Amino acid sequence: MPDTLLQVDHLKKVYESSTGDVEAIGDIGFTMRRGELVCIVGPSGCGKTTLLKCIAGLLKPTAGAVILDGSAVTGPPPNMALVFQEYGRSLYPWLTVRGNVELPLKHKTLTRAERDRLIDDALAAVGLEHAAKSYPWQLSGGMQQRVAIARAVAYQPEVLIMDEPFAAVDAQTRADLEDLVRRLHLERGMSILFVTHDIDESVYLGERVIVLSKSPTWVQEDLAIDLAPDRDQITTRALPRFTELRTHVYEQIQRAKRGEAVRPGV
Amino acid sequence: MTLYTSTVRTARRPSRIWTKAAGSIGFAIGLPLVLLVVWGIWGTLAPATFFPGPLTILDAFVDTWIGPAFVDDVLPSLGRLALAIVLSVGVGIAAGTVIGLTRWLRELLEPLLEFFRAIPPPVLIPVFVALLGVTDTMKVVVIVFGSLWPVLLNTVEGVRATDSVMTETARSFSLTRSQRLFGLVLPAASPRIMAGVRQTLSVALIMMVISEMFYSSSGLGFQIAYFQRNYLIAEMWSGIVLLGLVGVLLAVIFSIVERRVLRWYHGVKEVERA
Amino acid sequence: MPHPGIRSSPHGPASFGSDVPMTLAPPAPVHTSTVVVARRRRHPARLVRKIALGSLGIVGFLGLWQLVSALGLVRASSLPSAVDTFAQLGVMARDLEFWRNIGRTMTTWAIGLVAAGVLGIVLGAIVGLVPFLRRATHTTVEFLRPIPSVALIPLAILAYGIQMQAALVIVVYACFWQVFVQVLYGVADIDTVARDTARSFGLTRASRLRNLVLPTALPYVMTGLRLAAAVALILAITAEMTIGNPGLGRVIFQASNVGNITTVYAIVIVTGILGLIVNLVFRLIERRSLSWHQSVRGEEVL
């Protein structure tokens, strides 16, 4: 068995609301190896965020299990870091950039020097060394998201989970941030679980793309992306293989939206 | 990569700086000066018994308050006021945090607390005089009990409504409870809390004035009432001016503290408005 | 967070989990559907609990009060029992003079509020809309505003004696600032884009006032009036206690002088109820006018 880092088993989540019970996730299962970059895409409303929150231990699933590095996830595990879509609400406005990056490190047993080194390293990795003393709200959206990424990187998690992090950012900045994620993955061997609604992004970034079905969600397809690890925005996106893959994923999503895919074993 | 906020600045020419400064000062003291002059002239032209001119008041001010009266009456009053404010704000924030974060406690106490807040604070003075007599303790307690509610209830409101994404961030990074309280909940609630502190400050001042003017035999308020009863008009006015200065001083101190504590909040608001 | 409550599911236990990535061949199409099951209302239960706990709090407090006085922990001359206090309240409610006193207090309140409101709105609008006036009056306003209006009570007594006018001076002075400052905020809050739009379309001054200034400032005016209403009640009663013009405040003052402690406590409760009513009414009015306007307004001081 290859080095499995994360295992999701028959995950199911039912929400009760005032308008009735909604089965957000029906039956999701997949595994993720150490050092992989896995992207998750699906039609709107297919419970991608719910799935992430269950994996991150922020929500209790109705059934099924999430196993991280051999232990079951019952609450937010200490070796996992999250980057949210709403960076404006996830960064603390009363802390400077440096303060925000430092906050999760405070309860880890580290010496001052080690902590400072981690912070400086993380800020340098995202290209924000000179912005350490600024406040998040003084920065642009793209830079704020970099701060959130730096915060996650400094935390040194085993797996980094990103929930549609670039959805609220303009296209040019998004391209820069995608390359940043690839770089972090390649240079540091970070295991990354990346949820997005952008099909091109999922193919550009991922080593695997997991396509989710419509609600009640299950894994409709687990696709291997056989592009070279060394990717760049212009050449990679112009490759015929890229176009093939993205078209396939697009078609899968369309089928998912129309509810045409069938679950094997039902 | 440049920061959003970088702009090109050129040096201001010195003469422009001076004219600008002069303009600011002019606006600052212009109207008050004009009003004082008008009052002074009116005082000499049509003297009213109860409205002496500003110079008379100034004389009386120096005579009355610069001297033993300051130490005997003013300082103790201000001391009691300061102590009461510290207690009010301290108890208000501490209790407000506990109540705000405990759902059943909040639901239990909220109607009761809202009722206490609705009672006009000076009405409580006779109650406390009956309970504690006219002592220094009573004077402090009555200020605390009257002015506690705004900061208490604002704290309750502030700590309940922490942004959900911020809370999830804290949870996802496994921050401890005390880290969450002091690093997230309280800073996020601080704008609300400061608004409550501002109201508490002004109620505290009112309580000090009323309790001293009508229920006490010493203190700044008592002196002013004494002057009024004995028709020492200029002295009475000087006392009112002194009270006004105390009020302004409190407002200035609050303003300084608020600007420091809420520097980030004002920054966020400015960015939002732009 | 919603609790996990499992209803039914048409999907069997079969799973589709695999750690081997699929190839490009897609499976055959079949319909799936979302599962929406039976309703369960949760909101009324929460509301009932809230009301129950709140009532319990009040009842508990009254019980504690009664217990403390029954046990004699505090002398009866300082703390009447809860039962006695409410009994006295009942007696007073049957006395016409009690209601007349409420009327007198509320009359002072109303006149003071209206006068302060009109002055505050008019002067606030004028100063707010003319930048020169704004700058010129800034320091004066910042100095006069924090002066506690109760400091003027001795002056009011000298100037007007024991009459309603004296009380009105105190009430109007404090309430004026509440409304004035809010109007200044409101006028300053006019969206610059909206204003430029109005000017580029050649709207007259009067039309801009009506269509742009008024709607923007209205929620602020409502907030100012709500704050002023609370302040007016407090000062009206305070004035009656200290100056001595007829009203609830004077009743308390006289009762405490003769040691009629039960009346004192009873009136305290009455004033609390009055305060709640005033606050509730004005909050409702404010919420109506605020329904489209989202902003945080700084609450002002007395």
Image (cartoon, coloured by chain):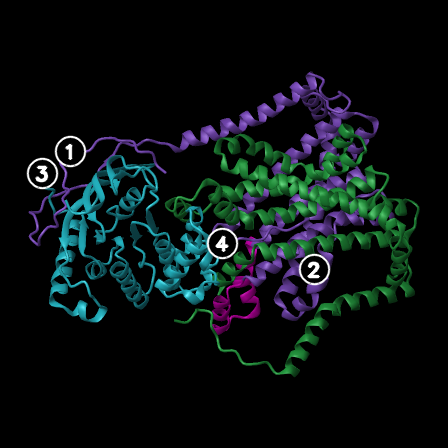
Chain colours: A cyan, B green, C purple
| Residue B171 in the image, given as x and y percentages of width and height | 39, 44
Q: Name the residue under label 4.
A: C293
Query: Which subunit holds the residue at mark 4?
Result: C
Q: Mark 1 points at which residue?
A: C13
Q: Earlier in the sequence, mark 1 or mark 4?
A: 1
Q: Mark 2 points at which residue?
A: C142
Q: Does residue C243 appear anywhere in the picture?
A: no
Dominant secondary structure, magenta: helix
Distance from the alpha carbon under mark 3 to that under mark 4 = 54 Å
* Discs 3, 4 touching: Cβ within 8 Å: no
Q: Nearer the viewer, residue B156 or C119?
A: B156
Q: In which quarter of the image is residue B226?
A: top right
Query: Which subunit holds the residue at mark 3?
Result: A
Q: Residue at x 20, y 33 (%)?
A: C9
Q: Are marks 1 and 2 on the same chain?
A: yes
Badge nearest the viewer, 1 or 4: 1
Segment tinted magenta in the rendering: C190-219
